[in-house]
Amino acid sequence: MSWKEHWKKILKAAFCMLGFIYLFVLLVDPYDTIEISLPLDREPIVSNQRYSYPAIAQKSHHDSAIIGTSTIRLLNPSQLNPLFQSSFVNLAMNSPTAYEQLKIFELFRRTHENIKYVIFGIDETWCDANANPDKFTFRPFPPWLYDNSEFNDYLYLLSGRGLENSVRMIEYWLGKRKAKYSGDGYDVFVGDDGRYDLNKAINNIYGNNEQKSILEEKVRNNDFQIDRNAKYKFPVQEMYLSKMGNSLSDETVKIFMFVPYHVKNYYSKINIFEACKKEIVDLASSYRNSYVIDFMFPSGITTEDSNYWDVLHYRIGIADMLPRLIDKAMAGEIENLPVKLHYH
Amino acid sequence: MLFNSQIFLLLFLPFVVAVYYVIPAQKYRIWFLILASLSFYAYWDYRFLPLLFISVLINWCASIIYMRSKAVLIIYAGVLLNLIIIGVFKYFDFFSSSLSHFFDYASHSYSIILPLGISFFTFQQISYLIDLKRGQGKVYRFDEYILFVTFFPQLIAGPIVRHNEIISQFWKSPFRPNLHENFTRGLVLTVLGLAKKVFFADEYGIFIDEGVVVMLAEDSISAATAWLFALSYTLQLYFDFSAYSDMAIGLGAMFGFTLPRNFKTPYISRNLSEFWKRWHITLSRFFRDYLYIPFGGSWNGYGRYLVAVLATMTLCGLWHGADWSFVVWGFLHGCGLAIYFTWKKTGIHLPFLIAWLLTFLFVVNGWVLFRLEDFSQAKEVLLAMYGFNFESALFIFSDNTFFIIIGLILSIFGPNNHQLAYKKMKNTKFWVYPIALLLAISVVWVGGEREIKFIYFQF
């Protein structure tokens, strides 16, 4: 073979292989995002929710959504649905930034009309005083799956990740792999509750028993006083949260829910969280049909170590209580309950 | 744009190569390459294009004025100006914070953005000016000169090319005997470099980045963790930078130009002197010719040699980055070279295996300083490497033990890409499909959100 033939054959063969791989990925369409793919049943097979949830947000026939971080991921749509006569999808992700929450919300809003409820999980992400919050985490985020254009999906699908996930989708079709998430986005991501270990949890919460005693001592001494005059700004609310609220119609019920952090976490930034609550109430008051519900204060839930895996994540039993408590709070029936209603 | 990106591999490169070969005359080909190279640079950050252009223009004007006036001051001023440019953009914050630390005053960080490739294009031009003064250079046409500095395969991270080894090639038409063989070998070297970057360097980098965070958060780092970290970074750095050099040389060959080699299986070296003849060769020869020899080299007594080698290698360390850990790394290599020089005088030859092992360990230990952010982290890891914590390694590293062993075998005993492309490869069917498959899979792999820069871009 001459050298001229040699490089031509290399390029021709590479071109054919590239075309074959591309066609394979397009037909499989692992993120369920393009029109020309094979008409087969697709389920989320990618563990990174940033890749899996756009299809759930876009294609689901739900009329209500939950937006937030892992602190609200355990809110179970199947428990909310009968209480609110609606169909919820839980789009909360692990450690999303405020910007990433905005993106998944926008995708849901753009593809759904007559949205009935949106529950915003309010936690540290929205009580961040940083003027320039990060847009992304170290986890890959595919902006092309969140925009209006299908054209760029064709470009970005030609990737190592696209090829890997196409193979995963084939495995799913062959019954050799299970879907990562259900169609309503709900997923129990915390450990198996049957194997819960209180000592380990205390270690996660306090670091060690000494720290636990120090905190209890401070609580006894009433060291955690709220400074009502403390001034904080939360630019992230103006940048992203209000954008979400503004885009919803008056008919949509907007629920801003302060998540039930363990008190250790609440106390560590007590003034910031309390100032944050004021700001959220101000924001909510600018909308019709909005509620500010608060689980973030010392209560029967948040002071009990055995309710938690760590300072951020409560156990499944607590998660199962939340829908009813939200419902009660919205009805104003909060007496003796571990929940507050700050605004309606 | 990155060499390892689809926009480069599927759009920019095919377009530039195709147009280059369609253009009928070499002088137009040169201008087309200039335009392509400036576009390539502007794609990173168009704000630095004026800096690059002004730097080229000033140096070119200096060469004309010097050749007309023979005033040495012009050369000194030109070199000084280059040093000022690199000093401001690369070292200003470093010197300012170091001074404030020594004299105990509050410093202000100006957060000056480092223009890509500044260390490389500045040094190429400094070497040109010095060569002029030495009578080893001439004044070039502006198109020749600007392409010498900006030719896109070598603009961002070398090899550091000398004017007298590249500019004359610009005028050679690519349509000459061996065109197709040169093109094929260049293409294959580019593909092998790309695959090395994508499937080795980046894969090491992914687990190292995660592993370093976890490792440094540990109360006590086990020796196994520290060693696996040091070895995997040793491999990442070599695969990453040599992959870039392979691609640069391969791309140059696709246009009919021969760029100098930058790596020759450095981890097989039996002493540090050999290591620097195999590692980043074009930088080594720059420091040898423009610093080490002018400082006195090894021909003017032992004392002078020590000063020359320590000063050269310390500056070599500083070239790599505006941080004291790079300075110390360079100084340590200077010490290592001095020890080898002294040892050589005894006439005692160490057995190959011992000599290789000592050299390799010295290099691996040095890379720890290179990778970690500050001395305290480096000290912690280095102490752990020789400590008595015999717990098992972090799973992030131990999971990759086999991959690390494969990398070590390939980097020490395997043929390097240059040997594969220029010596082993024949124009037979046997080579077609593996190379085509590597190219296709690599192009797919670099798509999507995966955009991993070459390590040496930061230098």
Image (tube, coloured by chain):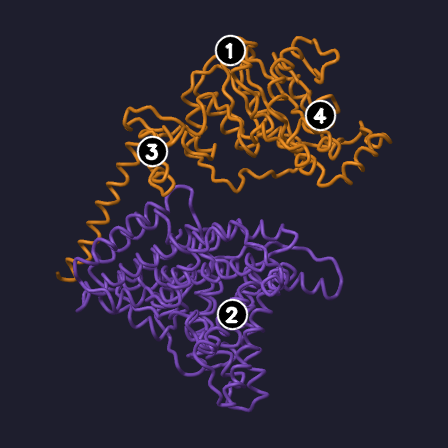
Chain colours: A orange, B purple
Kindly identify the amino acid type of the residue bearing the numbered disc 4: Thr
To which residue does mark 2 refer? B361
Dot 2 and dot 3 residues touching (CB under 8 Å): no
Task: Report how far apart the C-alphas of labels 2 and 3 lie in the structure.
Answer: 45 Å
Same chain check for tags 3 and 1: yes
Same chain check for tags 1 and 4: yes
Closer to the observer: label 1 or label 4?
Answer: 4
Dot 1 and dot 4 residues touching (CB under 8 Å): no
Q: Chain of mark 2?
A: B
Q: Chain of mark 1?
A: A
To which residue does mark 1 refer? A86
Residue A210: horizontal and vertical position, in percent?
78, 40
Q: Is residue A124 above or below residue B141?
A: above
Dot 4 and dot 3 residues touching (CB under 8 Å): no
* B139 sits left or right of A121 in the view: left
Kindly identify the amino acid type of the residue bearing the numbered disc 1: Ser
Q: Earlier in the sequence, mark 3 or mark 1?
A: 1
Q: Secondary structure at mark 4?
A: loop
Q: Secondary structure at mark 2?
A: helix
Dot 1 and dot 2 residues touching (CB under 8 Å): no
Q: Chain of mark 4?
A: A
